[in-house]
Image (cartoon, grey):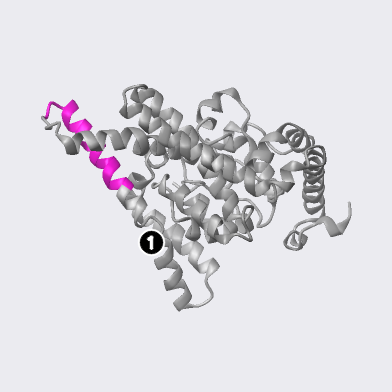
């Protein structure tokens, strides 16, 4: 294997590991190049394809809302269908964070980022998340991996991790000091001086303002009212209650479902704690088991394609889906883990003997 195919940061790894990572990367790139050669319009119209998918997903969200309000579809159809469209917007946002679309037309790029955030208000500010996510690629699986650790990656399974997977903000409210420890690990790794640490802390803590705070208040108000009524309380069903109910069905609940599935899949497919920095081979596994399909449906098969992205960042999400089959063959041939359900027992450690955070 040519040493030149290694990334500079990977040269600190043992030669055997670095060479294996380089070989996997080279083969996945070859799969993508072959697909592009057979479908040259993919590369030629990458921006236009992304914009078309974006418009379709937004139209899906709006269309579902109209159909629900008009009484054409019930709530139990509207919520999962809208969650599916929102999962596509999440994938587009992720690709935009990597500057895959509209590098030269920045107003389109930033407009897509804004609307993807606006329609997923329980997500974080994407311009702030960009720094977290690029940092995640550099340090995935280590203690300063704020993006994944803040989603419970590496935490021992129990009531709090389950709660935080189902409702991230409730998890934050119930164990704020854990999150502050994780934030401290991230800031100390990323910032070089006290002023920069303070600034980075403030920026990071503001990532859910304003949309995340608004979503959390409205969603928890709706859940509280439903619980109160189930316990026998009386709530006047006036215009405010009816408006909140419609809002919950067309946006709040779909986003809660989408986010819960994404947190569960993402936090458990990433490894943590005994992963060497830059060792892409140990950063992720691949979920393909049928039992995961109900969750994968609402995060657009994130668990089936995200490992491909860790090895080769360049490909947009729809191309990763198209080449997932041959890429899985490459990953299997080189020993990348598939459907490692022991990760729940090990709290996402690569090895069973690694210490686990309670």
Magenta highlight: main SS: helix
Which residue is located at x 32 percent, y 26 percent?
A: 70
**Per the image, is 307 magenta?**
no
Count how many numbered circles sit on residues in the image. Answer: 1
222 and 69: which one is in front? 69
Rendered view: 8 above or below 253: below
Q: Which residue is drawn at 45% across and 29% down?
A: 81
Residue drawn at x 66%, y 36% is 321
Return the x and y of residue 204 as percentages of the image width and height: 43, 62
185 or 202: nearer the viewer: 202
Q: What stretch is highlighted in magenta?
A: 215-233
Taking the image as shown, residue 298 lies to the left or right of residue 308, namely left
Q: What element carries label 1?
A: loop
Residue 347 seen anywhere in this rendered image of the structure: no
Residue 216, position in %: x, y? Answer: 31, 46
Asked whether residue 189 appears in the rendered view, the answer is yes
Label 1, residues with CA under 10 Å away: few <14, some 14-19, many ≥20: some
Foreground of the two, 173 or 123: 123
- Residue found at the far right of this picture: 2
Q: Where is residue 327 in the image (x, y as percent from the top left)?
A: 75, 37
Q: State the image coordinates of residue 283 (x, y, percent, origin top left).
A: 64, 47
- Is residue 192 left or right of 211 when viewed as pictured? right
Q: What residue is pinned by disc 1?
A: 206
On screen, residue 108 above or below 55: below
Q: Does the magenta stretch include residue 217?
A: yes
């Amino acid at each position: 294997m040519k040493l030149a195919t290694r990334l500079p940061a990977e040269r600190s790894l043992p030669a055997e590991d670095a060479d294996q990572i380089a070989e996997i990367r080279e083969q996945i790139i070859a799969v993508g190049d072959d697909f592009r050669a057979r479908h040259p319009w993919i590369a030629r119209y990458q921006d236009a394809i992304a914009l078309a998918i974006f418009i379709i997903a937004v139209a899906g969200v709006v269309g579902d809302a109209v159909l629900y309000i008009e009484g054409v579809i019930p709530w139990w159809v509207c919520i999962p269908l809208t969650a599916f469209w929102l999962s596509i917007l999440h994938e587009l946002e992720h690709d935009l964070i990597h500057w895959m679309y509209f590098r030269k037309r920045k107003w389109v790029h930033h407009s897509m980022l804004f609307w993807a955030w606006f329609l997923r208000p329980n997500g974080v500010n994407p311009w702030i998340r960009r720094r977290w996510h690029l940092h995640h690629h550099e340090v995935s699986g280590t203690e300063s991996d704020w993006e994944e650790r803040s989603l419970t990656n590496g935490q021992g399974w129990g009531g709090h991790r389950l709660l935080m997977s189902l409702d991230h903000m409730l998890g934050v409210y119930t164990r704020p000091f854990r999150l502050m420890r994780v934030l401290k690990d991230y800031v100390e790794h990323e910032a070089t001086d006290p002023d920069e640490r303070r600034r980075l802390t403030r920026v990071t803590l503001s990532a859910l303002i304003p949309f995340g705070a608004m979503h959390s208040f409205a969603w928890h108000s709706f859940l509280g009212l439903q619980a109160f009524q189930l316990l026998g309380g009386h709530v006047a069903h006036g215009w405010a209650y009816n408006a909140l109910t419609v809002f919950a069905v067309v946006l709040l609940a779909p986003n809660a479902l989408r986010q819960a599935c994404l947190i569960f899949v993402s936090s458990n497919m990433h490894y943590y704690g005994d992963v060497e920095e830059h060792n892409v081979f140990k950063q992720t596994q691949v979920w393909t088991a049928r039992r995961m399909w109900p969750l994968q449906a609402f995060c657009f098969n994130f668990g089936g394609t995200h490992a491909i992205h860790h090895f080769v960042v360049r490909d947009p999400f729809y191309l990763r889906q198209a080449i997932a089959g041959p890429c899985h063959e490459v990953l299997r041939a080189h020993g990348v883990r598939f459907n490692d359900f022991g990760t729940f027992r090990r709290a996402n450690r690569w090895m069973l003997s690694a210490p686990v955070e309670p």
